[in-house]
Amino acid sequence: MNILNLLFTKDGLIYQIAKNKSILEEKSYFVDEESPENLIADKLDEVLIKQRYDEIHVVSALNHFTLMPEGFSEHETGFDLISFNAPVDKEKEELMLSINEKFKVQFYYTFPKNFYKKIKELALPIHFNFSGEKFLNSIHNKNNKEIHINLYHNQCEFFAIDNKKIILYNNLDVNSEVDFLYFVMFTLSKIGFGINETSFFAYGETTENETFISELQKFVKNMRIVFDNIPTKNFILN
């Protein structure tokens, strides 16, 4: 069975083609100042026609989202709820829902409508998910105050958990060590997590973000790298 895995980040597209448990191909595309205007859309077109797929798994790490308790059913308010965190355009974005039964929460998020239509037009079994839900499902939490940080290319998502209860989730751009540390320390002060009583766990692109990790380790006492996204082996915390 040929499976296409797609990860959309704030400035990039990462794809992986897998057959059974073997990785056949993996590649990343990131937008910079010299990139063509439609780089991600063009690369998505190329990947979708690259070969025949049996299934497609799509994960969005785009930071248009809101977190709600499990069971919230006023789905028609999804766009309005997301708009408190980020500007949304109903004409260009598809409203999506991901439910995490493990922690009893659900994520409303939006996904670019043009990408959504291109993928759906293939008429294959397609699974959409939000990166926060997928990340949360991989966390093994104890009864302590914990900070879980998943690092991407110039981006991170962040869970604060206390006694198996989610206190906070955020997904933000990270372009400098100063921004990253300020975000972590500011968040801790706001939610009342003491540095010495909190355990920190890092996942994702920890090698690429080695400087961020080393700077954070200067301030926090309990820090552990749980997972590193090794090319051709792991894909978004499988």
Image (cartoon, grey):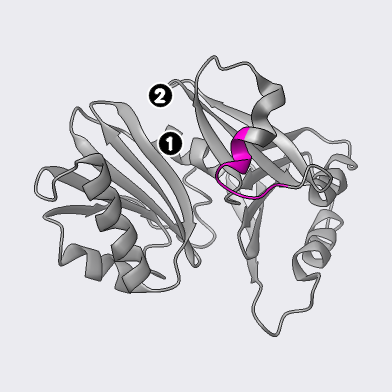
* Residue drawn 36% across the image and 42% down it: 159
Residue that lies at the very extreme toward the bottom in this rendered image = 34
The quarter in which the N terminus is drawn is top right
In the rendered structure, find residue 103 and report the number of the disc placed on it: 2
Q: What element carries label 1?
A: helix
Viewer-proximal residue among 209 and 194: 194
Disc number placed over residue 175 in the picture, else none = none
Q: Give the answer, above or below, for where 210 lies relative to 2.
A: below
Question: Going 63% across and 67% down the picture, which residue do you hit?
Answer: 28
Dot 1: within a 10 Å radius of its alpha carbon, few (fewer than 14), some, or many (20 or more) residues?
many
Residue type pointed to by label 1: Leu
| Magenta stretch contains residue 69 | no
- Give yes or no for contact between labels 1 and 2 (Cβ–Cβ under 8 Å): yes
Residue 210 visible in image: no
Of labels 1 and 2, earlier in sequence is 2
Total number of numbered discs in the rendering: 2
Which quadrant of the figure has residue 110?
top right
Residue 99 seen by the camera: yes
Res 217 quadrant in image? bottom left
The numbered disc on residue 136 is 1
Which image quadrant for residue 129?
top right
Marks 1/2: CA–CA distance? 8 Å
Q: Position of residue 181 (x, y in %)?
A: 29, 64
Between 145 and 122, the one nearer to me in the picture: 145
Identity of the residue drawn at 26% across and 45% down: 190
- What kind of secondary structure does the magenta stretch mostly adopt? loop
Q: What is the x, y in percent for residue 148? A: 32, 45
Which residues are the magenta region?
A: 81-88
Which residue appears at 31% of the width and 40% of the height? 160
Amino acid type of disc 2? Phe
Structural crowding at the residue carrying mark 2, measured as other residues with C-alpha within 10 Å and reported as few (<14), some (14–19) or many (≥20): some
**Left or right of residue 153: residue 40:** right
